[in-house]
Image (spheres, grey):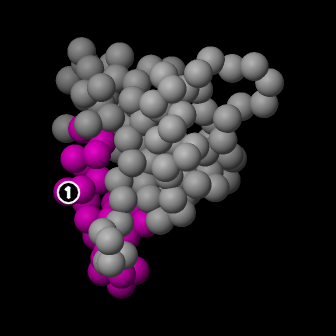
Amino acid sequence: MQANEQISLKMAQKDDLWFHAAQGIAGSHVLLRRSENGTYLGPKDNQKGSIGGFIEEDVQFAAQVASKYSKGQEGSKVPVLCVLNPQRAIRKPPGRSNVGTVTIIPGSTQKTVVAR
């Protein structure tokens, strides 16, 4: 989908979190953004299991959205990949690829979240 490319390659910023159903499951690309003033939990306030200082409830909500708009929506628990700093971590694969197809640069900060 062209909208997925727009979200992942044009709109994503360095402080965002990017979500997509785990590899092999087609679905929508979802961004979780910082507030306008850039506030978030600081490193000392990170909750167990959070990523990038985002509040766990927000991460779960974004994962649920990515899960709901994926081909895995039939399952009770869909694994969702969460990537920090998508502006640097997400790229269009080299060569010819389908519209909306992206790749994650190895070594990027990522976590799998199970949408509840």
Residue 56 location, x and y as percent? Answer: 25, 60
Q: Quadrant of residue 43?
A: bottom left
> Which residue is depicted at the point 43% across and 54% down?
17
- What amino acid is at disc 1? Glu
Which secondary structure lies at badge 1?
helix
Per the rendered image, the range of residues in magenta is: 40-64
Q: Is residue 26 above or below residue 57?
A: above
> Which residue is depicted at the point 40% across and 24% down?
27
Left/right placement of residue 111 relative to residue 93 reads left
Residue 46 visible in image: no
Q: Crowdedness of circle 1 by 10 Å Cα count: few (<14), some, many (20+)?
A: few
Residue nearest the viewer, comparing 76 with 35: 35
> Which residue is depicted at the point 22% across and 47% down?
61
Residue 79 location, x and y as percent? Answer: 36, 33
Q: Say if the magenta span includes residue 62.
A: yes
> Which residue is depicted at the point 55% across and 46% down?
10
Q: Quadrant of residue 65?
A: top left
* Residue at the limit of the structure toward the bottom, as seen here: 44
Q: Is residue 7 above or below residue 83?
A: above
